[in-house]
């Protein structure tokens, strides 16, 4: 028994493949879209074809009589209890429809074809009502009112005020006044929206859901169904992408449950791609008016921001994105005087939800391009101007974010050095002829990287058990939505317990088993669930070492876990094999114990108080991205050739995972900046297909260079910060700045399409500002 | 129902026949009649590649292919690669390079790449990117998928 167990190479920072990878490449993974349950029916929704109308007649009799149809329901059969942030969206509408998405009836039938036939047999008559699509017009007194209890069409407002704008303006040498129009884009999850609901004989609901917040999902779903949240079990099969789109309850989910309740059979409801484009949430469009000033020496003096948000017909998380926007406007760079006001206004458009980056995509597009404009206005280069205003570690933003390990200046400096920014920037700017012109641009941002305390708790529960063979089951409240948290947690637990990663099973797909977690959002999961998993593993280790100490008469402090053994720390000699020890602990008569620990990790952050003040995240992170582009001045086509990523990540946990998140984010942001545009005209979605809505494909991806800043943030698991939103936030404005460097045109109305570029260069309307 | 058709074809190496409606598409037949759910319906319009299968050596979008047109053909889906003790080199490369996130695009990508490498065992970067152009992935940003193609190509040429 003198085996020496070699010291293990740390798993932290390695490139670890995802544990669900094999099933996915083999095509064995079963998504809800693939599931079939015994006696399952297919659900379908009838949506209105009007943008604002009164329903005069809704006749379902023919549909209900069709053989194979088991239920047809309307708003008359279901309670008018709203879902969403303002609880203004009843799953099935009766009386009035307010946007093109509105669900007015639903069927459950034996096949999809019968369900489609049934929908076609439903007769509806409407009286059209005056409609309004522009948020500014919707605020006018004469505008049609969308919701009786929301006078003036105001959905939600946010305001903050710090310092003194007038004083800031008085000391400014330069004041810019700019208006941005930030457009609709949508998630385009490859797995279309889908849900499967089933009631058991006791009246309890099991819902197979794509949700990314299973625990609060129960709370949000229950009232509209008229059942107790405790009577809902959420099962989460793998999902085909989420990106924030599954952070709320949307009407199709309760509708499917109603159908299951009525038919007493499992019902599955799957969106078509067209429905996905029309009826799933979008990113929040924002009209941002900003006035900002600086002194001649480059010091920022004030930012005064007014945002108008097109809320659409109902309210989901889109209307709350100012919560994140204001942190960027007030806290990204040192801004002594700040005012931010936003109003989300009801219109007859579709509505927005949360989307990766959550408002910071919009705020950073504005701030990062405005910083360039301001630099030029005061006669400084984009790097020096940013460095002049970059905060130091330990500074507190006006809203109370403590930037304890602020790496903003490092990000900027490294990004400039790695890309030879200033030289290339100056050279590009001199070129004024030639068909192809090159540009380089930088953008930076700040994002919460240690959770975000927007609810009463930002915590995550973890349960860790070990069996008689030293296999570990780690049950976490945090969901896997394709982003790779399973791999990260496996690494962390294997690292602490000295067991092979293959011996760890992660369970996080069943709300009847898992402990509470607030949800996958706000770049929080590696940080929060990672900390929870680590703390649970540390507790398990303490229990194991205490038992080993009794067994072997060696002080616990002189032992550690390594390679599936308890070893002596100083020489690595095995004291006992871990599985043997666990069996000895288990079968110890009266002293028997199992390794079975729990943890609830609540990060040390605070909810916002008055004036939205509060240190709401346990860590913050900065990034600087540099885009290098080539603009074809003839066609207007912009090609991103290279993206240099400099990001404060605290510590890399999984090299493959972090790059994957960044590359996916860059692709999304290239789409936001250059090609993606969900065109909504008079309330109608004009391009609901991949043919007409262009997401980035393989040929458009640039070369990517990485420079991670790893300073081990004190509260992070092994020093890690949350990372996954900044890559979807920063690239687009870096590209816009690069386009300006190439052709001297600003685009404050992304996407920067070839048409807009060509018009700006060759005349016509709707171009940029020269 | 009028004019239903009987079709016979080779599916992942096995002779199969069944009766299909003239309007049925290959994707639904694979998914609903054969329980082969690896190929996904992500658009149903031939615009995303999630439903890609290989028919007589060529990659096709099965969502816009009539099932009737499978008659007499040799059809391969990802499930057909799930045999033997070792993973197919493309699949192994996907796992190792981190080319899988949500996985919804993955079966279609894998089949597209099988086809790509069969046509051109040593594709350069531009050829790989062009070859993947019809397959949308919303998660990975394609970089790791491109890495997977390069790595699989090396393995396949070696062995
Ligand atoms: S599902 Fe066939 S191409 Fe999209
Ligand atoms: S891995 Fe999610 S779409 Fe490709």
Image (cartoon, rainbow, N blue to C red):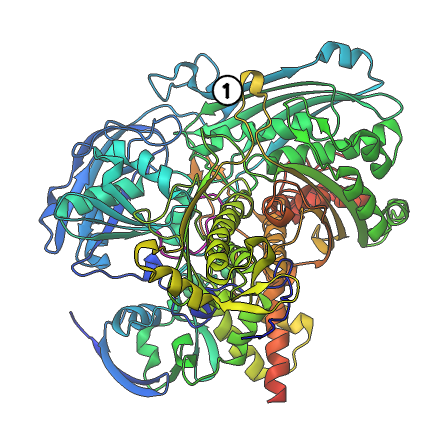
- Image location (x, y in percent) of residue A379: 89, 30
Chain to which mark 1 belongs: A
Residue B153 occupies quadrant: bottom right
Rendered position, A350 above or below A436: above
Q: Which residues are magenta?
A: A236-245
Task: Answer few, some or many: residues within 10 Å of disc 1's Cα (few below 14, many 20 plus, some between 14 and 19).
Answer: some
In this view of the protein, can residue A634 be seen by the observer? yes
- Image location (x, y in percent) of residue A341: 58, 19
- Image location (x, y in percent) of residue A54: 27, 27
Q: Is residue A242 magenta?
A: yes
Label 1 element class = strand
Query: What residue do we see at 46% from left, 49% from top?
Result: A242
Q: Is residue A588 magenta?
A: no
Between residues B151 and A284, which one lies in front from this camera angle?
B151
For residue A263, side relative to residue A404 (left or right): left
- Image location (x, y in percent) of residue B103: 46, 62
Q: Which residue is mark 1?
A: A157
Query: What residue do we see at 39% from left, 50% from top?
Result: A274
Quadrant location of the C terminus of chain A?
Answer: top right
């Amino acid at each position: 028994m003198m085996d020496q167990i070699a010291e293990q190479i740390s798993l932290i920072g390695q490139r670890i493949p995802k544990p669900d990878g094999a099933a996915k490449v083999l095509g064995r993974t079963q998504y809800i879209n693939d599931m079939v349950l015994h006696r399952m029916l297919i659900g379908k929704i009838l949506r209105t074809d009007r943008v604002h109308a009164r329903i005069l007649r809704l006749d379902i009799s023919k549909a209900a009589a069709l053989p194979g149809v088991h239920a047809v329901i309307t708003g008359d059969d279901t309670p008018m209890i709203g879902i969403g942030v303002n609880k203004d969206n009843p799953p099935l509408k009766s009386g009035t429809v307010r946007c093109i998405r509105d669900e007015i009836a639903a069927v459950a039938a034996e096949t999809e074809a019968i369900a489609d036939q049934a929908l076609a047999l439903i007769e509806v008559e409407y009286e059209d009502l005056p409609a309004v699509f522009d948020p500014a017009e919707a605020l006018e007194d004469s505008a049609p009112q969308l919701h009786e209890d929301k006078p003036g069409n105001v959905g939600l407002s946010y305001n903050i005020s710090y310092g003194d704008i007038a004083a800031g303006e008085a000391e400014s040498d330069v004041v810019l006044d700019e208006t941005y129009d930030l457009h609709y884009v949508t998630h385009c999850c490859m797995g279309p929206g889908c849900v499967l609901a089933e009631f058991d004989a006791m009246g309890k609901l099991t819902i197979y859901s794509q949700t990314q917040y299973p625990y609060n999902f129960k709370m949000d779903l229950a009232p509209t169904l008229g059942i107790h949240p405790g009577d809902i079990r959420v099962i989460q099969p793998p999902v085909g992408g989420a990106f924030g789109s599954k952070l709320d309850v949307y009407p199709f989910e309760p509708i499917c449950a109603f159908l299951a309740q009525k038919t007493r059979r499992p019902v599955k409801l799957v969106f078509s791609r067209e429905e996905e484009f029309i009826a799933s949430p979008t990113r929040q469009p924002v009209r941002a008016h900003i006035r900002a000033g600086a002194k001649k020496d480059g010091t920022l003096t004030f930012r005064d921001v007014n945002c108008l948000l097109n809320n659409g017909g109902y309210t989901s998380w889109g209307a709350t994105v100012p919560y994140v926007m204001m942190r960027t406007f007030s806290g990204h760079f040192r801004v002594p005087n700040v005012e931010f006001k936003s109003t989300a206004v009801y219109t007859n458009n579709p509505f927005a939800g949360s989307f990766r980056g959550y408002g910071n995509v919009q705020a950073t597009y504005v701030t990062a391009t405005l910083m360039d404009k301001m630099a030029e206005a005061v006669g400084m280069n984009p790097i020096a101007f940013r460095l002049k205003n970059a905060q130091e570690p330990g500074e507190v933003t006006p809203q109370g974010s403590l930037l304890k390990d602020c790496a903003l200046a490092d990000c900027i400096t490294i990004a400039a050095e790695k890309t030879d920014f200033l030289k290339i920037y100056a050279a590009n700017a001199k070129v004024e002829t030639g068909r192809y012109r090159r540009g380089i641009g930088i953008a930076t941002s700040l994002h919460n990287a240690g959770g975000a305390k927007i609810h009463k708790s930002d915590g995550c529960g973890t349960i860790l058990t070990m069996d008689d063979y030293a296999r570990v089951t780690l049950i976490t409240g945090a969901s896997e939505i394709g982003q790779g948290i399973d791999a990260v947690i496996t690494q962390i637990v294997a690292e602490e317990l000295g067991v092979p990663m293959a011996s760890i099973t992660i369970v996080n797909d069943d709300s009847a088993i898992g402990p509470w977690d607030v949800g996958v959002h706000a770049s929080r999961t590696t940080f929060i669930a990672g900390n929870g998993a680590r703390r649970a593993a540390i507790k398990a280790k303490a229990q194991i070492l205490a038992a080993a100490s009794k067994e072997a008469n060696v002080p616990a402090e002189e032992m550690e876990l390594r390679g599936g053994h308890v070893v002596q720390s100083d020489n690595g000699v095995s004291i006992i094999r871990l599985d043997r020890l666990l069996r000895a602990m288990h079968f110890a008569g009266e002293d028997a114990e199992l390794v079975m620990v729990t943890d609830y990790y609540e990060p040390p952050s605070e909810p916002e108080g008055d004036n939205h003040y509060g240190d709401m995240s346990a860590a913050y992170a900065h990034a600087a991205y540099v885009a290098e582009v080539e603009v074809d001045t003839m066609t207007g086509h912009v090609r991103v050739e290279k993206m240099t990523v400099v990001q404060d990540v605290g510590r890399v946990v999984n090299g493959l995972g972090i790059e994957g998140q960044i590359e996916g984010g860059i692709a999304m942001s290239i789409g936001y900046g250059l090609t993606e545009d969900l065109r909504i005209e008079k309330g109608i979605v004009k391009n609901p297909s991949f043919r007409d809505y262009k997401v980035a494909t393989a040929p458009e991806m640039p070369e990517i260079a990485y420079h991670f800043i790893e300073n081990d943030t004190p509260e992070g698991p092994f020093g890690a910060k949350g990372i996954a939103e900044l890559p979807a936030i920063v690239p687009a404005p870096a590209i816009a700045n690069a386009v300006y460097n190439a052709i001297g045109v600003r685009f404050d109305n992304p996407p920067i399409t070839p048409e807009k570029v060509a018009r700006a260069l060759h005349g016509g309307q709707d171009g940029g500002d020269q | 129902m009028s004019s239903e058709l009987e079709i016979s074809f080779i599916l992942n190496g096995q002779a199969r026949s069944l009766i299909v409606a003239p309007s049925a598409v290959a994707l639904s037949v694979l998914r609903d009649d054969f329980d082969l759910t690896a190929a996904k319906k992500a658009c149903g319009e031939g615009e995303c590649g999630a439903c890609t299968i290989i028919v007589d050596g060529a990659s096709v979008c099965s969502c816009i292919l009539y099932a009737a047109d499978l008659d007499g053909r040799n059809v391969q889906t990802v499930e057909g690669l799930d045999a033997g003790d070792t993973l197919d080199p493309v699949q192994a490369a996907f796992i190792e390079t981190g080319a899988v996130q949500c996985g919804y695009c993955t079966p279609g990508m894998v089949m597209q790449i099988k086809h790509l490498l069969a046509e051109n065992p040593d594709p350069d970067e531009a050829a790989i990117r062009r070859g993947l152009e019809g397959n949308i992935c919303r998660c990975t940003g394609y970089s790791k998928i491109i890495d997977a193609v390069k790595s699989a190509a090396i393995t396949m040429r070696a062995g």
